[in-house]
Image: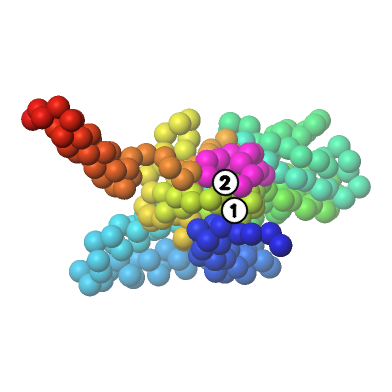
Amino acid sequence: MMKCRPALALAVLLLLPHFASAQQATTGSQYATRADLEAQVQELTQQLAREEELKKDDVKTLQYELLVAEDRLVNGDFQPSDALQLDVQAMTQFTGSFTLDRQKRLVLPTIDPISLQGVLYSEAEEAIRAGLAVYIRNPIVRVIVTKRIAIIGGIASPGFYDIPPETTVSQAIMLAGGPAGNAKLNQAEFRRLGDAYTDPYGQLAFTNVSLVELGVMSGDELFVPPAGTGLTTAKILGAIATAAGLVFLFTRIFGTDF
């Protein structure tokens, strides 16, 4: 029978409720629609109108969520380097995996690029269908969007993963095999070009915030500090105790005060 380390088992148990609830939230209608975001903006605005009744940290989180929702309504969801698995019925030249360019354009062979600037993920199929309709009568389009991110650190199977944008941090960690040993899940963070994101939520691994809500781009890293990184309180106290013990030992042997 396979043995499971207690700390690892506890970490997995803590993540499972977030993983399960996030899965329920992203099945069926997977991506937030424009109507969803407009309703979210209205709700957040109403909550912030009672700012004096809220805790300071809660106000900051609500303000961040409002900023994100408003930005998505204006600029859309797509980011440069998003990967699109495109299936256009009976059109093999437009079927396959494509990556958006720096201008958030879908570049397909023999036709003009299709801009996805300002387009939500939930609007992707309609936007691409409209772009193809200039050249094809009644195109039938299916789209799957993914982001390629590195999941590294205290992870069972670190590496690069192609992940849907609505995946939460807890889901991403579980897709990479879950935390390894005593990984510091409460310190998980995203990095871009070596710099950590500003985390408006705290303890990302235990929230149901999605990659798109965090502004994650392809090429970013999800880093979970492995066990034993940094100077813990126990290590510092241990070092102090060791030094004190050595002073006492030398005093006993040589009769010298240090």
User: Is residue 72 among the parts visible in the rendering?
Assistant: no
Query: Label 2 belongs to which residue?
Result: 155
Identify the amino acid type marked 1: Gly
Q: Closer to the camera, 17 or 245?
A: 245
Query: Label 1 belongs to which residue?
Result: 178
Q: Is mark 2 on a helix, strand or loop?
A: loop
| Residue 155 within the segment the image draws in magenta | yes
| Residue 59 within the segment the image draws in magenta | no
Q: Closer to the camera, 129 or 188?
A: 188
Say whether residue 138 is left or right of residue 217.
right
Image quarter for residue 62? Answer: bottom left
Magenta part of the chain: 150-162
Q: Earlier in the sequence, mark 2 or mark 1?
A: 2
Disc 2 from disc 1: Cα separation: 6 Å
Identify the amino acid type marked 2: Ile
Say whether residue 19 is left or right of residue 139.
left
Q: What element carries label 1?
A: loop
Q: Closer to the camera, 166 or 38?
A: 166
Question: Main SS of the magenta segment?
Answer: strand
- Name which residue lies at 53% across and 50% down: 181
Q: In this view, does 150 lie above or below 200?
A: above
Q: In this view, does 12 lie above or below 172?
A: below
User: Which quarter shows the N terminus?
Assistant: bottom right
Image quarter for residue 107? Answer: top right
**Crowd band around label 2 with a 10 angstrom C-alpha radius: few (<14), some (14–19), many (20+):** many
User: Which quarter shows the C terminus?
Assistant: top left
- Name which residue lies at 89% across and 41% down: 92
Say whether residue 207 is left or right of residue 94.
left
**Crowd band around label 1 with a 10 angstrom C-alpha radius: few (<14), some (14–19), many (20+):** many
Say whether residue 131 is left or right of residue 17.
right
CB contact under 8 Å: marks 2 and 1: yes
